[in-house]
Structure formats: C-alpha cells, structure tokens
C-alpha cells in the first residue's frame, strides 16, 4: 500500500540521478569519439607534412649540390 509508494518516491531522485549520469556519459563518449576523429585527422596531416618536408629537403640538397659544382667550375676559371 502506502509503504510501497513511499519507497518509490525515495527511488525517484535516484532514477533522475542515473538518467543525468547516463546523459553525461553519453556526452563524454561522443566527445571522446570526436577527439579520436580529430586525432586520426591530425595524424594524417602530420604524415603528409613530414613527407612533403622530406621531398623539399631532398630537392634542396640536389639544388645545393648543383650550386656547389657550379661554383667550383666558376672558381677554376680565370676572372674576366
């Protein structure tokens, strides 16, 4: 009878708390998913950046070699 109703009244705030905790956990989970996606994206960007950096460095090394050999040739010629 009335005792059971009293028991249900007591547990109602608990149910509300559980619901609040559940929605908080959902929010946290979606935040973590979002962060994971961003992390993957950043990882891809970093790999691309490193790759293009490597290419640039190789090109730069080749250019400086050409410049050095050019300078050697110019240096061995008598000045005009």
Image: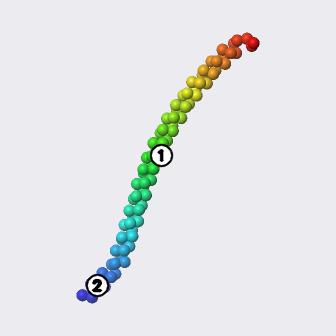
Residue at the outermost right position: 80
- Residue visible at 51% across and 37% down in the picture: 50
Q: Nearer the viewer, mark 1 or mark 2?
A: 1
Q: Which residue does the image show at 70% across and 15% down from the upper left? A: 75
**Which residue is farthest bottom?**
2
Residue 21 point in image, percent of width and height: 39, 68
Determine whether 37 is above or below 79 in the image.
Answer: below
Q: Are marks 1 and 2 in contact (CB under 8 Å)?
A: no
Q: Quadrant of the N terminus?
A: bottom left
Q: Position of residue 60 (x, y in %)?
A: 58, 28
Disc 1 secondary structure class: helix
Check disc 2: other Cα within 10 Å, few if <14, some if 14-19, many if 20+: few
Image location (x, y in percent) of residue 47? 47, 39
Residue 13 vs 34, above or below: the answer is below
- Who's the residue at 40% across and 58% down the image? 30
The disc label shown at residue 42, or none: 1
Asked if residue 6 lies left or right of residue 58, the reply is left
How far apart are the two marked residues, 1 and 2, measured between alpha carbons? Answer: 55 Å
Q: Which residue is painted at 60% across and 21% down in the image?
A: 66
- Check disc 2 and report its element: helix, strand or loop: helix
State the image quarter where residue 63 is shown. top right
* Position above or below: 46 against 67: below
Tag 2 or tag 1, which sits nearer the N-term?
Answer: 2
Determine the image quadrant of residue 13. Answer: bottom left
The disc at residue 30 is none
The residue that disc 2 covers is 5
Using a 10 Å C-alpha cutoff, classify the residue at mark 1 as few (fewer than 14 neighbours), some (14 to 19) or many (20 or more).
few
- On the picture, is 59 further left or further right than 31? right
Q: Considering only vertical position in the picture, is 48 above or below 17?
A: above
């Amino acid at each position: 009878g009335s005792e059971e109703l009293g028991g249900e009244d007591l547990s109602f705030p608990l149910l509300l708390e559980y619901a609040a905790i559940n929605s908080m956990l959902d929010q946290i989970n979606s935040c973590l998913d979002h962060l994971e996606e961003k992390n993957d994206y950043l990882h891809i960007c970093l790999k691309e950046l490193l790759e293009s950096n490597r290419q640039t460095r190789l090109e730069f090394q080749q250019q400086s070699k050409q410049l050095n050999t050019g300078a050697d040739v110019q240096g061995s010629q008598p000045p005009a």
